[in-house]
């Protein structure tokens, strides 16, 4: 497949002033008549190139006259016309086949309904069109379909008319007043239930908010509608951005490639991010629904009103919108809690986001798919909806927020919208807006060094050294940054030069007794100072530091970097006990556990491993600190995940990691038995006093209670398994039920496991989202191996065609069951499933294909076996562009 480069961007030679689409909808064959009002931008004639794939051409007319085959050129991916006049009307009639579309891009069938997914390049599977985000057009859409089968016909914008037609068909006409690129087009046809509310926006506009779902699911949509209304309010209040539509619709689809899609006024959602009730959704799902609904809604400004010039700019909308949804969730959590808990609620959200970044993005940034948040090239854009573009992209926005402060950042946003509302722009345009404010507020400084975050791949390392001068009671801190070559850079000769980045580095100092040392900041003092590291190496000196301090580094994770500082173990324990920054405090405990665990893995033996006793003592102190919220404790007391440990283990030895982590969990389960028991008891009493609500306070309590249960059972299964069974049987909500079930499934009493799984299945047989949990839990269970998964694949409820189901079983096993998958049989199974999925849905297959991207880091036995599996995929005669890009890069 050809490689597309960012620097090859050329503006499109035509404008599409209006787009009229008329659909004769039918799941077998749909006919589309597209009428485009086109105008050339330049003075001389140029070919008009339209994208189109998997389409059947019926006719083409220009200004009402049919074209003959000599007047155009039809290739597999394009249709080329040779217009002479500067403006003309083009009408194309074509057909497509929704029922055959298993890729879920373009127009497809899910359940009995019809849906579209156009981002990034799905519109070309509906009709020929300039399928690129910088061609914006006003859309009018006519939908015609059988009135019984498809009583609801939805598209973007406002409903203009609804008419009954002959032969039991009917028609709806929709008009979107906002010009948009075709990737934001959507249609939905089907029979749905709807929950709605009318609101008045801050500007005084009346708007209708609607959530559509399959018949029978209406009782599970209340939370989604609340989240939508809260999103509208939050964007008004925090960003001053109003809803610009009369009607905003969300539709839940069972089959969906990603989480959701921000089509203008008509968001289509994976039903997993819409449907919730206490009996079927966990606290984590409630939280995820809030965050995805917020995310898609916030795209209405950051993505839709201002969109991307080309797909290399994807992070312009995704990084920014993830940052906005993270802040939304943090504000929502904080708002519902008393002051004391609110601070730690924000820290909890930050911890969860950083864990997600380290789990997915750090490995990506160190592997064969490493790319800057604004990639320089791609073969298949569908492969670049990555953790780097999204999550690291959000960190890069967050750093700008840190450099400018909330007020300055909002001023930058205003500047951005003033300059670019209604346009398709670049990441540079965004930073220009922020830089305008930055320069005005920081005379003599600018963001030129900061911009390098957009073009540099790899996770930078910041090395810290401290020099304490006892005589002068002063302390100097030296920060040095470096960023190793990654991905393709490794093969460059001469090696790539990586210039320094602008890293906002938040720092605090603690006395040897653990009390905060005030730091001079201008004429003020502060606990936390943000240092502007912009060169390879810089030093800062602090006065009035009597003893050698313990530094608290990269507070609140102020930059997406890896910190290197040679802490003594007792210093980490001190930070875990006393640091006033909740993020850094959590980090210290995790680092101590990481050191211990890595030292258990043979090749990683070092002399800085803590004694088990120090770890137990630290966990004990944390677990008995009643100033900490339950939600925070649930994060602080959990050991670093297998995947995060694997990333730090050299060479990576998955089986040893799993064994070490399980052993330590059992040790802590036994050593702190009394504490776990008393937490379990107290939390049970507290929770029993009120009925279930998916609020952060209760969610934290349930999380800690499940954490305590899991430690107890891991430590002494014979003694505590009954407690888990009791919780399972008496559960009044899905969080309790899943917490106990997962504990049961991870121990080894086969009979108890089978009984619980069977009871769970029969209870939730008819709820696909819960059956996904049932598959996922078994996929990750300690006893599950390739044979178990194969036999689950023959279960009548399993299908590869539904992405949620494939993710629940195949992805969970390949990505999150290190014990089960890391063997020759495991890798062979993975290769087989990648190929099977590729024939159905390349976008999904390519994600699974990335499971062992970092194979070169593994210990030799694993490495060679993965290489064999990769080569097997590579040798397959028909690979999609998606999978072939991934596999070729992995083997390069
Ligand atoms: N913008 C969509 C991405 C869908 C692309 C799938 N090929 C989801 C989101 O980030 O909101
Ligand atoms: Zn997004």
Image (tube, grey):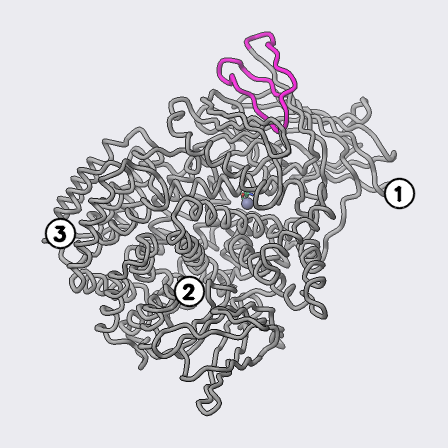
The residue singled out by tag 3 in the image is: 720
Q: Tell whether position 258 is magenta.
A: no
Farthest front residue? 523
Q: Nearer the viewer, mark 2 or mark 1?
A: 2
Question: Left or right: where does residue 80 sit relative to residue 337?
Answer: right
CB under 8 Å between callouts 3 and 1?
no
Q: Could you classify mark 2 by the number of other residues whose Cα lies within 10 Å: few (under 14), some (14-19), or many (20 or more)?
A: many
Residue sitting nearer the eye, 346 or 587: 346
Mark 2 or 3, closer to the camera? 2
Q: Residue 789, percent across and down?
A: 29, 46
Question: Can residue 825 be seen in this snapshot?
Answer: no
Mark 1, ligand 1, within 8 Å: the answer is no
Q: Quick one: which residue is furthest to the bottom in this view?
A: 471
The furthest residue to the right: 43
For the record, the magenta segment spans 143-168
Say if mark 2 contacts mark 3, CB within 8 Å: no
Which is more toward the observer, 76 or 527? 527
Q: Is residue 154 magenta?
A: yes
Residue occupied by mark 2: 581
Q: Secondary structure at mark 1?
A: loop
User: Disc 1 designates what residue?
Assistant: 44
* Count of numbered circles on the image: 3
Q: Which quadrant contains ligand 1?
A: top right
User: Mark 2 vs mark 1: which is more N-terminal?
Assistant: 1
């Amino acid at each position: 497949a050809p490689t597309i480069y960012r620097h090859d961007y050329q503006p499109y030679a035509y404008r599409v002033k209006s787009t009229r689409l008329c659909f004769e909808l039918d799941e077998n064959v749909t006919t589309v008549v597209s009428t485009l009002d086109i105008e050339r931008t330049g003075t001389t004639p140029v070919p008009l190139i339209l994208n189109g794939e998997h389409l059947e051409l019926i006719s083409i007319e220009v200004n009402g006259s049919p074209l003959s085959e000599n007047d155009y050129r039809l290739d597999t991916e394009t249709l080329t016309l040779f217009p002479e006049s500067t403006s003309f009307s083009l009408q194309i009639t074509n057909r497509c086949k929704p029922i055959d579309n298993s890729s879920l891009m373009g127009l497809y069938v899910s359940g009995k309904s019809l849906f579209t997914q156009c981002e990034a390049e799905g519109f070309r599977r509906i009709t020929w069109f300039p399928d690129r985000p910088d061609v914006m057009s006003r859309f009018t859409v006519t939908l015609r379909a059988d009135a019984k089968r498809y009583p609801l016909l939805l598209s973007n914008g406002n409903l203009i008319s609804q008419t009954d037609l002959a032969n039991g068909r009917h028609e709806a006409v929709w008009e979107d007043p906002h010009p948009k690129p075709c990737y934001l087009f959507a249609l939905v046809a089907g029979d749905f239930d709807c929950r709605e509310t009318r609101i008045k926006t801050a500007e005084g506009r009346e708007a209708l908010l609607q959530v559509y779902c399959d018949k029978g699911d209406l009782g599970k949509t209340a939370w989604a509608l609340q989240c939508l209304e809260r999103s509208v309010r939050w964007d008004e209040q925090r960003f001053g951005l109003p809803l610009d539509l009369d009607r905003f619709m969300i539709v839940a689809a069972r089959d969906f490639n990603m989480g959701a899609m921000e089509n203008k006024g008509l968001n289509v959602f994976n039903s997993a991010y819409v449907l919730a009730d206490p009996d079927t959704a966990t606290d984590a799902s409630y939280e995820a629904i809030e965050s995805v609904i917020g995310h898609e809604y916030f795209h209405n400004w950051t993505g839709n009103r201002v969109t991307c010039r080309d797909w290399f700019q994807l992070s312009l909308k995704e990084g920014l919108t993830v940052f906005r949804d993270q802040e939304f969730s943090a504000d929502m959590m904080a708002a519902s809690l008393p002051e004391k808990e609110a601070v730690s609620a924000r820290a909890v959200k930050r911890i969860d986001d950083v864990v997600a970044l380290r789990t997915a993005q750090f490995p990506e940034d160190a592997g064969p798919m490493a790319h800057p948040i604004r990639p320089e090239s791609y073969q298949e854009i569908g492969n670049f909806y990555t953790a780097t573009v999204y999550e690291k992209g959000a960190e890069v926005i967050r750093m700008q927020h840190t450099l400018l402060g909330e007020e300055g950042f909002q001023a930058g946003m205003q500047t951005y919208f003033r300059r670019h509302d209604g346009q398709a722009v670049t990441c540079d345009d965004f930073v220009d807006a922020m830089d305008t404010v930055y320069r005005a507020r920081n005379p003599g400084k600018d963001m030129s060094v900061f911009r390098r975050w957009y073009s540099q791949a790899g996770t930078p390392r910041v090395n810290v050294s401290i020099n304490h001068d006892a005589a002068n009671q002063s302390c100097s801190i030296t920060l040095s940054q470096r960023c190793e070559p990654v991905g393709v850079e490794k093969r460059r000769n001469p090696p790539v030069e990586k210039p320094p980045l602008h890293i906002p580095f938040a720092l605090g100092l603690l006395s040897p007794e653990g009390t905060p040392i005030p730091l001079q900041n201008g004429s003020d003092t502060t606990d936390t100072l943000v240092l502007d590291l912009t060169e390879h190496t810089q030093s800062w000196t602090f006065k009035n530091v009597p003893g050698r301090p313990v530094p608290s580094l990269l507070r609140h994770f102020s930059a997406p970097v890896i910190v290197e500082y040679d802490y003594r173990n007792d210093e980490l324990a001190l930070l875990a006990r006393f640091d006033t920054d909740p993020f850094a405090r959590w980090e210290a405990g995790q680092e101590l556990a990481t050191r211990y665990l890595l030292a258990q893995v043979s090749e990683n033996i070092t002399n800085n491993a803590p004694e088990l006793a120090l770890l137990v003592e630290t966990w004990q102190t944390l677990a008995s600190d009643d100033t900490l919220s339950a939600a925070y404790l649930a994060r602080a007391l959990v050991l670093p995940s297998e995947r995060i440990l694997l990333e730090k283990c050299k060479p990576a030895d998955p089986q040893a990691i799993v064994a070490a982590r399980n052993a330590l969990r059992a040790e802590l389960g036994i050593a702190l038995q009394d504490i776990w028991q008393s937490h379990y008891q107290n939390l049970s009493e507290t929770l029993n006093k009120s009925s279930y609500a998916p609020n952060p306070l209760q969610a934290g309590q349930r999380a800690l209670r499940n954490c305590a249960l899991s430690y107890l059972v891991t430590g002494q299964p014979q003694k505590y398994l009954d407690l888990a069974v009791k919780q399972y049987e008496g559960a009044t909500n899905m969080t309790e039920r899943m917490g106990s079930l997962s504990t049961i499934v991870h121990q080894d009493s086969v009979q108890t496991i089978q009984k619980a799984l069977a009871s769970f299945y029969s209870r939730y047989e008819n709820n696909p989202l819960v059956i996904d949990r049932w598959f996922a839990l078994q996929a990750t269970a300690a006893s599950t191996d390739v044979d178990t998964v194969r036999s689950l694949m023959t279960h009548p409820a399993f299908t590869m065609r539904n992405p949620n189901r494939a993710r629940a079983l195949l992805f969970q096993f390949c990505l999150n069951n290190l014990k089960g998958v890391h063997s020759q049989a495991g890798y062979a199974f993975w290769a087989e499933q990648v190929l099977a999925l590729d024939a159905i849905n390349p976008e999904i297959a390519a994600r699974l294909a990335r499971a062992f991207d970092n194979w070169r880091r593994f210990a030799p036995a694993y490495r060679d076996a993965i290489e064999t599996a990769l080569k097997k995929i590579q040798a397959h005669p028909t690979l999609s562009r998606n999978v072939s890009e991934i596999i070729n890069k992995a083997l390069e």
